[in-house]
Amino acid sequence: MHHNRRWHHLETPEQVALAAYQHILDAAERAIADHGTFKLVLAGGSTPEKVYRLLADTDADWANWVIYYGDERCLPANHADRNSLMATEVFLNKVAIPEAQIFTIPAELGPEQAAKQYRPIVASALPFDMVLLGMGEDGHTASLFPGHVHVKEELTHAVYNSPKPPPERVSISAEALSCTHELIFLITGANKQDAVRSWRSDEDLPVATIVPKNPVDIYIDSDACKP
Ligand code: 6PG
């Protein structure tokens, strides 16, 4: 079977973050040179957080970056477990991206309302320039979980019964996440080994439903890909 994936093997999570960071900056320069903006979808998780910390110390063309989120937890807007709070504190508050260019998912409104309000925002953003994603140990990505059924054509989904708390979330759909020029997966930690193996053997996991036209770049540390 044809694999549209490029695996970048690195030793540590820090090296994964650094490689992804450099890739993101290059992608931003290319996008801005090509069409004036860089539309970037952020992910939650501890590996992306390392990337955001590196970005926060960088001098980039921030005025032309536009920020979206792949998923969000339905919690109050300033809750410590919101992906948006993490990204804001470690990255967005420290760089000069105009506030009007940061599109947070209004997940405090609940899954249904928030997914509905975020849909036209995604619609007008597509195609994204770059999407960042992590992967959970069950092979979930964004808030697309194994066994969950969604309307495929929707750009965003209301998510209930997440196996990982909180149970209510909002996620950009696999189809919309795949509508991007570039896409990076950040995968670190020994608890990912089984899911990585399943993914490589083409099992039916949420990560495997993310299939952009261009190859995806997977940055992975040595703990996550031990045999
Ligand atoms: C969630 C988390 C989580 C995270 C992955 C990978 O959906 O509750 O955001 O799924 O993205 O577990 O995270 P790490 O980079 O921390 O391994």
Image: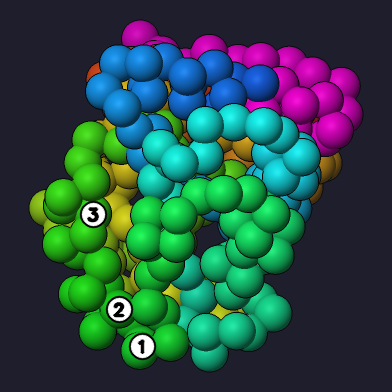
For mark 1, does the 10 Å Cα neighbourhood hold few (<14), some (14 to 19), or many (20 or more) residues? some
Q: Residue at x 21, y 41 (%)?
A: 126
Answer left or right for 206 relative to 195. left
Give the numbered dot on residue 110. 1
* The residue positioned farthest toward the left in the image shown: 153
Q: Which residue is mark 3?
A: 122
Q: CA distance from mark 2 to mark 3?
A: 12 Å
Amino acid type, mark 1: Gly
How many numbered discs, if any?
3
Q: Which mark sits nearer the N-terminus, 3 or 1?
A: 1
Q: Which residue is mark 2?
A: 114
Picture layout, residue 10 above or below residue 62: above
Amino acid type, mark 2: Ala
Q: Nearer the viewer, residue 120 or 204?
A: 120
- Specify start and end residues of the magenta stretch as a single range: 1-21
Q: Do callouts 2 and 3 mark residues in contact (Cβ within 8 Å)?
A: no
